Image (spheres, rainbow, N blue to C red):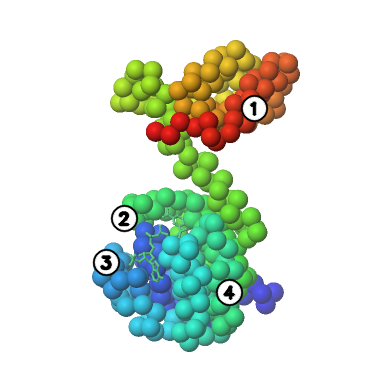
Amino acid sequence: MPGNEPAAALTRLPLLNVLGCGKAGRTIARLLHERGLCVLGDVANRSLASAASAVRFLGAGTPRDGIGGMACASLWLVATSDDAIAPAAQALAASGRLCQGDVVFHLSGATASAALAPCAEAGAAVASVHPVKNFSDPQASVRTFEGTWCGCEGDPAALAWLQPAFERLGARLFAIDARYKALYHGGGAFACNFIPVLMELAMRCEERAGIPRAVALDMFEPIARETLDAVFRQGIAPALAGPVSRGDAGTVRRHLAAMGEWDPQVARVYAQLGDVAVDIVRSLGRVDDDRLEATRAAMRSVAALPLSKDISS
Ligand SMILES: NC(=O)c1ccc[n+]([C@@H]2O[C@H](COP(=O)([O-])OP(=O)(O)OC[C@H]3O[C@@H](n4cnc5c(N)ncnc54)[C@H](OP(=O)(O)O)[C@@H]3O)[C@@H](O)[C@H]2O)c1
């Protein structure tokens, strides 16, 4: 199928230019280079000093002072912050550096490859490969990248080179519908980003109850780890313990009252999450509907409180 052939410019070892080489960009560029999948060309960040630092990390490439100083390349990684992808793509297309069949890709989970549309209009094949990974420590990320799930979407001609290349890095690839990327990426906030937020709310409750934060963190470590282990071992619904899983509406009402007197915002978060917990427990069919509905009513009476009831701290 012609559409699934790699872009013409990538049939030989491609030259890779990196526009935006921070934590994620330097990890991916270094891996592609170390595995012999590309030759590193020019690297540009907002400042030349930052590009020079990226090149030191990469062990190859040439730092440049913006797109104006970059040469042509058949492969372009645009790994700026998400909001800068579209303007960078516009600037790259306007620079005249792109040739028919070049490949331009980004790494964003929340942004579709369509953000690279100006490059496509200039003749490039565009795509996005989103690694579901925290790149906060690029040195460690290079070592631990193998096994990383990567959501892919974009032009078949670009993916025909990118997918085998990422497979060579040990990535586990899956297709993501570009229309749902914001939702897909938002789901990651629940799976990852909000776990520390939930722990913070737990700490505030314990501190309010007179238990020092450090003690509370130690106290919850085993049960938090056991719960997450249970989610992956047994599944989400069986891992859900606590009053909602027993249909203990009275305990839920006492939790909500105690939180509501102190910080209605905490009570409302509890109630919103608890409402979802009722759905999960119902799916197991082990608790009477009457008790579950009483629990849900308690949650909803608090979840609906107006924002003006918040105590600002
Ligand atoms: N970090 C993660 O865990 C992670 C995970 C998956 C995907 N991603 C994706 O990877 C991409 C990069 O994220 P990141 O965390 O690596 O960001 P980052 O560490 O902040 O790096 C962004 C880099 O882009 C450069 N930059 C910003 N605007 C630019 C512009 N207009 N022209 C040239 N360079 C520009 C910055 O230059 P300066 O250094 O000069 O400021 C910086 O080096 C994003 O699309 C993100 O969604 C990140």
Q: Which residue is mark 4?
A: 117
Q: CA distance from mark 1 to mark 3?
A: 52 Å
Q: CA distance from mark 3 to mark 2?
A: 13 Å
Q: In percent of the image, x 60 and y 12: which residue is there?
A: 250
Q: Which residue is mark 2?
A: 139
Give x and y (percent) for residue 275: 63, 29
Labels 1, 2: front one? 1
- Which mark sits nearer the N-terminus, 4 or 1? 4
Q: Nearer the viewer, residue 67 or 230?
A: 67
- Which mark sits nearer the N-terminus, 2 or 4? 4
Is the residue marked by circle 1 packed among few (<14), some (14-19), or many (20+) residues within 10 Å?
Answer: some
SS at circle 3: helix
Give x and y (percent) for residue 246: 62, 16
Labels 2, 4: front one? 4
Labels 3, 4: front one? 4
Q: Quadrant of ligand 1?
A: bottom left
Labels 3, 2: front one? 3
Q: Name the amino acid type tagged 3.
A: Ser
Circles 1 and 3 in contact, beta carbons < 8 Å: no
Residue 8 appears in the rendering: no
- Which mark sits nearer the N-terminus, 3 or 2? 3
Is the residue marked by circle 4 packed among few (<14), some (14-19), or many (20+) residues within 10 Å?
Answer: many
Give x and y (percent) for residue 26: 36, 63
Q: Is mark 3 within 8 Å of ligand 1?
A: yes
Q: Which residue is mark 3?
A: 53
Q: Name the amino acid type tagged 4.
A: Ala
Q: In percent of the image, x 64 and y 55: which residue is there?
A: 180
Q: Which residue is mark 1?
A: 300
SS at circle 4: helix
Is the residue marked by circle 3 packed among few (<14), some (14-19), or many (20+) residues within 10 Å?
Answer: some
- Which mark sits nearer the N-terminus, 1 or 2? 2
